[in-house]
Image (cartoon, coloured by chain):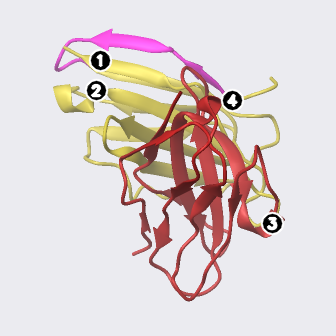
Chain colours: A yellow, B red
Amino acid sequence: GAGVSQSPSNKVTEKGKDVELRCDPISGHTALYWYRQSLGQGLEFLIYFQGNSAPDKSGLPSDRFSAERTGGSVSTLTIQRTQQEDSAVYLCASSLEARSGANVLTFGAGSRLTVL
Amino acid sequence: AQRVTQPEKLLSVFKGAPVELKCNYSYSGSPELFWYVQYSRQRLQLLLRHISRESIKGFTADLNKGETSFHLKKPFAQEEDSAMYYCASRYNFNKFYFGSGTKLNVKP
């Protein structure tokens, strides 16, 4: 597609349920990021995939959070046993080869998660 | 650890006034610095990057290695500049780090 696609755009769930958020990056983009955007907290880095390298998971806030990227393309962010503090907008971004000097991030529209 | 600091959560100015959004980074060396902007109900998008040395929508930003700053400036703010602005850094072709963002409100 022409841009980074994320689904669902909105998700309301009950505390304790699991949720999956999907990101479809721009074709050919080898780098993929997940960020969390909370009011007053800015953009919080969660996880970073680059090609076939092991992902950088250093930003995941707890072991309830996990992400995978299949075939170097689509990524899924999974939050298990959701808590109210998980409510936020989850942003996905992709970019060309990380070592490119022309590397910039293209963001998706985000998935707004509300945990009741 | 790498850090990007945006000290102002909210900046309000009147239309036509100069505006400066502050950004400081913590890492020495040669970072890549960026400004991203998010207008209301739109996606986060790149505004400008320091290596391009360009002016976008009247905004400029100069990398000051001595002060480790990359402040965003515009001499005459417009109402359509109202948005959320994020400063970001990247080192050694690694991942991007973002600041906490500054909400710019340009009043008529």
SS label for mark 1: strand
- Is mark 1 in CB contact (under 8 Å) with mark 2? yes
Q: How far, Cα to Cα, is label 4 from label 3? A: 27 Å
Q: Have a look at marks 3 and 1 and say if they share a chain.
A: no
| Amino acid type of the residue tagged 2 in the rendering | Ser
Q: How far, Cα to Cα, is label 1 from label 4? A: 22 Å
Of label 1 and label 4, which has the lower sequence position? 4
Question: Which sits in the foreground, B75 or A94?
Answer: B75
Chain bearing mark 3: B
Density class for disc 3 (Cα within 10 Å; few <14, some 14-19, many ≥20) is few
| Amino acid type of the residue tagged 3 in the rendering | Arg
Q: How far, Cα to Cα, is label 3 from label 1? A: 40 Å
Horizontal side of B2 relative to B20 (left or right) equals left
Figure check: A8 above or below B49: above
Q: Which residue is mark 3?
A: B53
| Amino acid type of the residue tagged 4 in the rendering | Val
Residue B34 appears in the picture as rendered: yes
Density class for disc 4 (Cα within 10 Å; few <14, some 14-19, many ≥20) is many
Chain bearing mark 4: A
Q: Have a look at marks 1 and 2 and say if they share a chain.
A: yes
- Is mark 1 in CB contact (under 8 Å) with mark 4? no
Question: Which sits in the foreground, A57 or B88?
Answer: B88
- Residue A114, disc: 1
Density class for disc 2 (Cα within 10 Å; few <14, some 14-19, many ≥20) is some
The residue lying at 76 percent from left, 67 percent from top is A99
Q: How far, Cα to Cα, is label 4 from label 2? A: 22 Å
Residue B81 place in picture, x, y as percent: 61, 36
